[in-house]
Amino acid sequence: MINLALAYLRDRPLTTALNVLLLTISVAMLVLLLQFGNQANERFERDAKGVDLVVGAKGSPLQLILSSVFHVDQPTGNVPLSSLELLRSDPAVARAVPLALGDNFNGYRIVGTDESFAELYGLELAQGAAFEKPMQAIMGAKVAEETGAKLGQKFVGNHGFGDEEEGAQAHDHAAFETVGILAESGTVADRLILTSFESVWDVHGIAHDHDEHEGHDDHADHEEHTGHEDHSDHDAHADHSGHDNHADHADDISAAENVLQASGDGLQPELTALLVSYANASGAIRIPAMINRQTEMQSAVPATETARLLDLLGASLDGIRIFAWLLALTGGLAIFVALLNMARSREADLALLRVMGASRVQVFATVIMEGVITAAIGAVLGWLSAHALIGIARSNFPTLSDLGLTPWSPVAAEWGLLLAVIAIGALAALVPALRVYRLDPAQVMARM
């Protein structure tokens, strides 16, 4: 019966192809929505785990969260170095992790930080050791994998947050040395390059209290800087302008330059943002209010801002999801019409099958199999297309790669989706199959 059903499908190739195409498109859209929603939620939860509050320059709270927690946007500006000690001295704060952003290597962001960053994300070294001196760096697992970085290898950073672009300014005068490679953690740290505050200052010619970094202290000839920030107990940090960076900046390079700018008297050490974890529940009530009302900084709660982002996307995603299901139902209707026409036009053939010994159930099953096979082909092609599209999009859109979307990570809901589409095909074939089941071979042969 399966071979006969396949023969009938091959007999009307254009109709079969159209039905398969409709189902393929609908399944691909539904799988993409499932994948995006599932992976985005998982990524947001992993990357924001342990971060109760983000403190940064005035601007968009969502932009602050995206740039400082998920590292997929431009920073809003800079905050004074004193903000680090202010928060770390507060008894309601368990941890304050400072960040210094602005440069990249092969599209991967270079983050100036201290040991508190590794503590926040529970990072472990797969090779080498943590940075201890200026211009030492440790690579995230994905960075090392994609760039082929090895221990002892040197590299230079470039202005901006994207890959090397035409006109990008490279810090050839200050090369980093890879001293460690992180074990894969499944967090944003896999896609980052970590270094110390001093390294960030030295790269941009910012004087600081530690004089042991000779050969890196005087780079004042660079009037535009990349926007790295310090985080640690060090007294001097990269100077940031405090101006908001907006999404309409010409490119990543100009955004980074706005994070670190020269003032009239030279560079003043500043930070990009602070990742805060509370020591007790009172901090959640008092600290955000204190930051927003008594300082020139702003505070943003990752859980709140990511929920707001998902809400903004939710309406659009729901609309796409409804459209995809309507498309799947349209595919089912097309199968129904095609099989109904087939049942009418091939009554003689089906009656002959009955005369030759085929039972009612066998003829009924043949028509059902046509609907099921059509739907199954469309479902499988749609599933494969969706995951392939994720891979293509990930390689062509850095933001999707930064979010950590992976192309071949199916979720349980996808199998339910495939079964639902196959069920649509079977239901679409039910009425034509019942018509065939009730067929009287004698009456059909008499009309011939």
Image: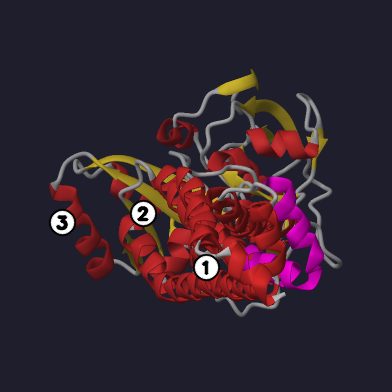
Q: Which residues are magenta?
A: 1-25
First in sequence: mark 2 or mark 3? 2
| Residue toward you, 338 or 96 | 338
- Amino acid type at circle 2 is Ser
First in sequence: mark 1 or mark 2? 2
Q: Main secondary structure of the magenta part?
A: helix
Q: Is residue 178 above or below residue 268?
A: above
Q: Residues within 10 Å of mark 3 (few under 14, many from 20)?
A: few
Which residue is rendered at x = 34% and y = 69% of the image?
296
From the image, tell me which residue sits under label 2. Answer: 83
- Cα separation between marks 1 and 2: 78 Å
Residue 68 as seen in the image, left or right of residue 6: left
Question: Residue 8 at what x, y percent from top left?
Answer: 74, 60
| Residue toward you, 30 or 375 | 375
Which residue is rendered at x = 76% and y = 24% of the image?
151
Residue 150 as seen in the image, left or right of residue 296: right
From the image, tell me which residue sits under label 1. Answer: 435
Magenta-drawn stretch contains 314: no
Q: Is residue 177 above or below residue 235?
A: above
Judge depth for marks 2 and 3 and give the one in front: 3
- Amino acid type at circle 1 is Arg
Residue 268 in view of the camera: no
Judge depth for marks 1 and 2 and give the one in front: 1
Judge depth for marks 3 and 1 and give the one in front: 1
Question: Residue 41 at what x, y percent from top left?
Answer: 43, 52
- Which of the image's four quarters has the C terminus? bottom right
From the image, tell me which residue sits under label 3. Answer: 285
Q: Residues within 10 Å of mark 1 (few under 14, many from 20)?
A: some
Which residue is rendered at x = 58% and y = 30% of the image?
184
| Residue toward you, 260 or 320 | 320
Question: Residue 119 at what x, y percent from top left?
Answer: 42, 31
